[in-house]
């Protein structure tokens, strides 16, 4: 027998050096090719199957993984009828005393282009500037599959013992992961007894330490439409008699939101913040201070010879952090019924439609919120206008399970090894539907929800970037965490 006996400890310096080289030589070029492909999620590309962009990024990622020739790794492209594909890989465990599995997660579908990109940047034109790789999807979440394999390969190079590892890379996350649950059901037996989930699709409070996401907000969404006429009419002839569909829209939304403060009015859309999360939020606020709100691209203008900036809802760091992680908030993310400004004549428009995105606190059940939202918006319409809330959908948020002692110790050790600072804990305002599915399916698993979406990375918006130096350290930290998993 020439088989090597796996070693117990990972040399952090060697691991970081190896993954950094892999990032420079292989992952960055792969991600540049990935950014060039408009693999928009099905919600934003109804013809995704015919266009083939999702299939292309899946094939490219699979080809790269297979080319790494990771010892003990098998890879499969799984495709259920009528659904977006997933990549599933398995790596045989070498820690003989371990019966658990590490599950690694990421996604390859993307948000749409959005407007407002800098003149020298674009969503499908990758560009490296000062260690940042700009372009749509690199940070959210194209890097995840590549980083996962690089972390596993670092363990293999040092012959470090590890549990069995499986990977699940989906292509429907930006559409709410509506295709994912059937795949989890189909693959559940092959996943095994999951003891650690590594989800590489979240954010970081700064680029100076490892950050663990401890909660995610849920979401309720849909299109609210107000119709008052069958066709547009001369505004001089009808205004004052025919109520504006936009004014009715405002009245209907006033049932939901206090427009002067942004507070959501229904009590059922709120929840108490658990004491542990409140304490962790205070610690994160102490670390980040006013960077919690300063990191956003605030509008500014000249006023009396000095530059004036728009203001956040609060400048208190703790309150700011809780507002974006544990408070419900309403956003209007799209509108219809409005002509372009250059074509906007003096016409009273027949309808106004808004796409609504309601972020829900982690402990609020989305299905009940969607039903309440629909009734609240549609019932007793002003002027008997036709008010509909269609395409309503919801995804319940997530609150992390209790932290096991080994997990907390390992997180701090990994953060100290690669960043020289302890691990930070922070809630995120976005939604990752998978996490609730996994928490229900594997209630004993520890959840390492982390990612590269730090300050100004601007996922979903213009000028999205991947902070490559941080990604390298995160990849090495993930390798160290897997090595410490019981």
Image: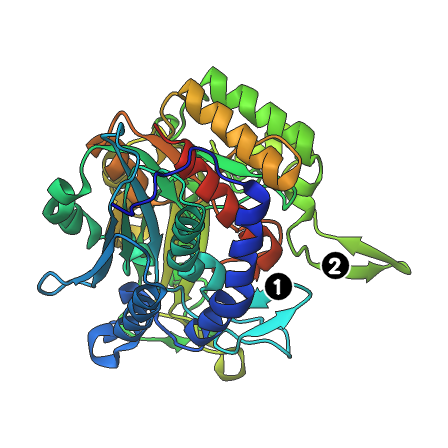
Q: Between 471 and 112, which is closer to the camera in this rendering?
A: 471
Which residue is most to the top? 275
Secondary element type, mark 2: strand
Q: Quadrant of residue 192?
A: top left
Please tell me whether mark 1 sits on a helix, a strand or a loop.
Answer: strand
Which of pointers 2 and 1 indicates the residue nearer the eye? Answer: 1
Please name whichever residue, 196 or 355, is drawn nearer the observer in this view of the structure.
196
Residue 473 appears left or right of 440: right
Q: How is this picture coloured? A: rainbow
Q: Position of residue 13 (x, y in %)?
A: 59, 45
- Placement of the N terminus among the 4 image quadrants: top left
Name the spot of residue 59 as percent of width and height, x first: 27, 72
Q: Position of residue 263 (x, y in %)?
A: 50, 35
Check disc 1 and report the residue beneath it. 132
Q: Residues within 10 Å of mark 2 (few under 14, many from 20)?
A: few
Sequence-wise, the earlier of marks 2 and 1 is 1
Which numbered marker is on residue 300? Answer: 2
Farthest front residue in view: 1
Report the front residue among 431 and 482.
482
């Amino acid at each position: 027998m020439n088989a090597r006996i796996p070693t117990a400890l990972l040399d952090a310096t060697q691991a970081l050096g190896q993954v950094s080289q892999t990032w420079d030589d292989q992952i960055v070029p792969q991600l540049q090719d990935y950014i060039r492909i408009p693999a928009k999620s099905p919600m934003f590309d109804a013809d995704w199957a015919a266009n083939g962009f999702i299939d292309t990024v899946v094939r490219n990622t699979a080809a790269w993984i297979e080319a790494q020739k990771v010892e003990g790794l098998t890879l499969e492209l799984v495709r259920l009828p009528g659904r977006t594909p997933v990549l599933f890989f398995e790596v045989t465990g070498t820690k003989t005393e371990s019966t658990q599995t590490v599950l690694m997660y990421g996604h390859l579908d993307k948000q749409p282009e959005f407007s407002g990109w800098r003149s020298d940047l674009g969503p499908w034109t990758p560009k490296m500037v000062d260690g940042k790789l700009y372009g749509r999807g690199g940070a959210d979440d194209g890097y995840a599959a590549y980083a996962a394999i690089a972390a596993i390969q670092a363990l293999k190079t040092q012959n470090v013992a590890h549990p069995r590892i499986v990977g699940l890379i989906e292509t429907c996350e930006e559409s709410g992961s509506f295709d994912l649950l059937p795949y989890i059901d189909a693959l559940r037996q092959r996943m095994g007894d999951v003891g650690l989930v590594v989800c590489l699709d979240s954010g970081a409070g700064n680029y100076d330490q490892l950050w663990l996401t401890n909660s995610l907000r849920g979401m309720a969404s849909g299109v609210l439409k107000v119709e008052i006429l069958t066709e547009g009419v001369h505004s001089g002839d009808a205004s004052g008699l025919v109520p504006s569909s936009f004014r009715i829209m405002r009245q209907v939304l006033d049932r939901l939101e206090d427009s002067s403060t942004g507070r959501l009015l229904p009590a059922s859309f709120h929840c108490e913040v658990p004491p542990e999360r409140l304490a962790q939020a205070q610690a994160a606020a102490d670390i980040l201070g006013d960077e919690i709100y300063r990191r956003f691209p605030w509008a500014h203008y000249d006023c009396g010879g000095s530059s004036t900036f728009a203001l956040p809802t609060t400048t208190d760091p703790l309150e700011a952090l809780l507002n974006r992680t544990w408070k419900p908030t309403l956003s209007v993310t799209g509108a219809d019924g409005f002509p372009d400004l250059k074509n906007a004549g003096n016409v009273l428009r027949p309808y106004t439609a808004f796409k609504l995105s309601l972020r829900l606190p982690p402990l609020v059940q989305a299905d009940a919120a969607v039903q309440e939202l629909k009734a609240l918006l549609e019932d007793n319409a002003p002027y008997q206008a036709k008010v509909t809330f269609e395409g309503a959908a919801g995804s319940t948020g997530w609150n992390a399970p209790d932290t096991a002692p080994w997990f907390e110790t390992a997180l701090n050790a990994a953060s100290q090894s690669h960043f020289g600072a302890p691990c930070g804990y922070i809630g995120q305002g976005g939604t990752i539907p998978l996490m609730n599915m996994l928490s229900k399916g594997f209630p004993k698993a520890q959840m390492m929800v982390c990612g590269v979406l730090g300050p100004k990375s601007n996922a979903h918006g213009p000028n999205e970037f991947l902070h490559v130096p941080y990604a390298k350290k995160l990849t090495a930290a993930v390798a160290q965490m897997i090595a410490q998993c019981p």
